[in-house]
Image (cartoon, helix red, strand yellow):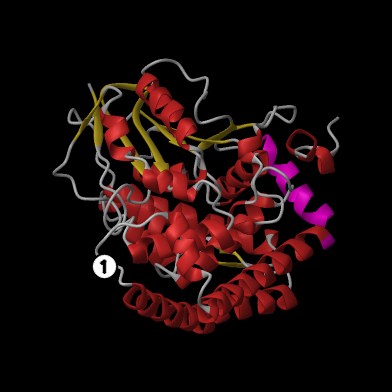
Amino acid sequence: MIDRRQLFLGAATASAVVASTLKWQSTEAAEKQMAEVQSHVSGLKGKHPRGVVGRMARLGSLHTEGLYDFSVGFRVVAAQAARTSAGAAFERLLVREGIDPASQITSEQARQLIDKDPEITIASKTWLSSQRIMWKAILDHHHANEDFYLSQMEAADNVGPGKLELVPTMDIPEECCHEIHIQPGGYVGDAFAGHTYHHGTNSFYQGTRGKNDQDEIHKMAANALPIPADGKVRRILDYGCGVGQFTVALKERFPDAEVWGVDIGGPMVRYSHMRANDLNVGANFAQRLAQDTKFPDGYFDIVASYIAHHEMPAQTTLKVIDEANRLTRRGGVYYPLDFNTAGAPTLTPQGMFALWQDHRWNGEIWRLEFSEMDFTGEIGKRGFQHMKDTPPVLRGFGARHFVRV
């Protein structure tokens, strides 16, 4: 039997919310699924120590929740104010150095400018401290109560409605072991990476795009995702699925489709599966590489991802595009949701200022490399037709609706 504490470490050293999700369904189908989810969420209140808020389990202790709430509030108020001030300071630096705000600069030029201003450095330190407080609070609680949380995942591993595939002995590529978002252990090195990431990214959203504790943003993206012209959606893949919020939202939109989420992080897909079970959503999850998914050629009608590519090297991104080409059937849709790349506004001084800070202080090791590549253009070179008239599924991200030719 696999030691529960070593399962991943060795290889890697409700009502209103549900209603809004179901607007696209018939009234009868929506009411049926509403009743199922309401019943299931009622059962969750006994499973989680402090109950749930809609789709989200509360943190397991009042102390942990207090620390987390403080870090979120600090991020939204103090850290944001500091970053706004830092942005103004950067504008003053541009004026002083005679740099056109509409021009393009390199990351090294941005770094040299930032290093000259203590106000920017203080803002970075303020943000960094709030991030570390949050990660420590979440991880300390889960490790202090590891038997309980490991038992929860073990109980869910082999039950449905969806499937879970884990590969505890998988050889994890070094590029997948970085601590993105400075999350201790990253996505592969801690048994509670999924729990930590889920709560942590809710904090990120509140500091940038708004609340996402009910998967609001993932559902918005899933519901706006274009479908093949023939209307056939039988199988969907979400690669780099993280904790499965986008995967689950896709399964909720297409309840009759076979939906898979794959991620290299075993703890991530394990948590994803447990949470999908909690929501009574039959999405499937597997621990696999996005560039080597093992699925048959042309198996999927839709292949998609949610902000995965800026967290992988450019060369890996090219391999993943090739894999998507292999997996998407002719006429099928490929939609890798991610940030804009190449040119304005990405490489303007203010754009590069934000990118450099994300790269330097948020552990986004591949962020600069991704921003400088022509991601959209590379997809067009690899057997896909770009549907340029389709707007982005989320405001502020690249419009990348592609059809397999």
Q: At label 1, which amino acid type do we have?
A: Asp
> Compared to 181, does 53 lie above or below?
below
Q: Quadrant of the C terminus?
A: top left
Q: Quadrant of residue 211?
A: bottom left
> Compared to 359, does 76 lie above or below?
below
Determine whether the residue tagged by mark 1 lies in a helix, strand or loop: loop
Residue 26 in view here:
yes
Residue found at x 33% / y 55%: 347
> Compared to 234, does 181 lie above or below?
below
Decide if residue 159 is on the left or right side of residue 39. right
Tell me if residue 152 is in the magenta stretch.
Answer: yes
Q: Quadrant of residue 84?
A: bottom left
Q: How many marks?
A: 1
Tell me if residue 162 is in the magenta stretch.
Answer: no
Furthest toward the top, the residue is 297
| Depth order, front residue of 401/45 | 401
What segment carries the magenta color? 144-158
Residue found at x 75% / y 42%: 154
Residue labelled with disc 1:
100
Residue found at x 56% / y 30%: 289
Decide if residue 140 is on the left or right side of residue 363. right
- The percent position of residue 222, horizontal first and vertical second, equals 35, 48
- The percent position of residue 41, horizontal first and vertical second, equals 55, 59
Q: Quadrant of the N terminus?
A: top right
